[in-house]
């Protein structure tokens, strides 16, 4: 059975490793993956520990099957620079290649939306490398590119997507129901 839940600190280690592994795929040969495990892990431990001081709600979740992590996602309130008000940022979403095409990303996005809607959040911001495989996923979900950014000394083009949470929730629900109906036939 699939379950989406918060990560433990031990599971965060696996999530950071998944991020690092996936990062090379996301960079798509445009730039070199220079993420170091110890630094990245400590960043996220501190990020979670400083949640209240930062007046934020920080979400680190995973999707699991039989206690095995299949993917993970991180989210938080968006910076004013990215979304003037009532917005969240999807800080990352990664799925093991062997677990893809099972709607796991949709399940985690649904969980994230349900976490933030009670806070009055209305929009979601996603940074996606222009040439990354995930970029088409965000387009497919109806994301609107509102800005572009250059990162890694101008080598990496980044599309900044904006989603309306209520609309995205309806679309995800529809896709998950279709998936269940398809599996039952």
Image (cartoon, rainbow, N blue to C red):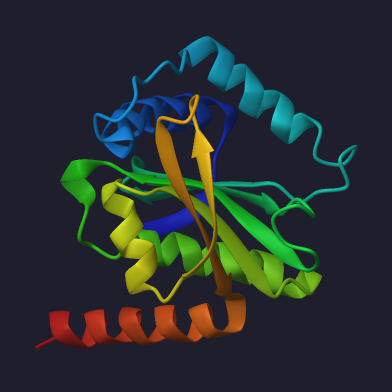
Q: Residue furthest front?
A: 154
The number of numbered badges drawn on the structure is 0
Q: Provide residue 62's location: percent of width, then percent of height.
A: 46, 47
Q: Tell me the quarter of the image containing the N terminus.
A: bottom left
Side (left or right) of 156 relative to 113? left
- Residue occupying the point 53% across, 85% down: 167
- From this view, report whether residue 162 is shown above or below residue 80: below
Q: Provide residue 32's location: percent of width, then percent of height.
A: 34, 19
Residue 1 in sight from this viewpoint: no
Q: Provide residue 56's location: percent of width, then percent of height.
A: 81, 48
Q: Tell me the quarter of the image containing the C terminus.
A: bottom left
Q: Quadrant of residue 80?
A: bottom right
Side (left or right) of 33 relative to 154? left
Side (left or right) of 17 relative to 28? right
- From this view, report whether residue 24 is shown above or below residue 109: above
Q: Quadrant of residue 139?
A: bottom left
- Residue occupying the point 54% across, 40% down: 7
Front-lying residue, 55 or 99: 55
Q: Provide residue 136's location: percent of width, then percent of height.
A: 29, 61
- Residue occupying the point 30% across, 30% down: 30
- From this view, report whether residue 34 is shown above or below residue 70: above
Residue 118 in sight from this viewpoint: yes
Q: Residue furthest left?
A: 185
């Amino acid at each position: 059975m699939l379950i989406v839940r918060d990560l433990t600190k031990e599971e965060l280690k696996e999530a950071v490793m998944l991020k690092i592994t996936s990062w090379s795929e996301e960079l798509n040969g445009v730039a070199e993956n220079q993420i170091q495990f110890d630094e990245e892990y400590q960043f996220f431990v501190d990020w979670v520990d400083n949640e209240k001081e930062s007046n934020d709600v920080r979400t680190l979740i995973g999707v699991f099957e039989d206690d095995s992590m299949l993917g993970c996602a991180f989210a938080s309130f968006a910076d004013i620079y990215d979304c003037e008000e009532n917005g969240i940022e999807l800080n990352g979403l990664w799925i093991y290649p062997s677990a893809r095409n099972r709607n796991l990303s949709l399940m985690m996005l649904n969980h994230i939306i349900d976490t933030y809607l009670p806070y009055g959040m209305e929009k979601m911001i996603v940074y996606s490398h222009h040439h990354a495989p995930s970029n088409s996923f965000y387009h497919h979900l109806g994301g609107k590119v509102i800005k572009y950014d250059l990162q890694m000394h101008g080598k990496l083009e980044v599309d900044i997507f904006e989603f309306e949470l209520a609309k995205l929730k309806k679309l995800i629900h529809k896709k998950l129901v279709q998936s269940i109906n398809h599996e039952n036939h």
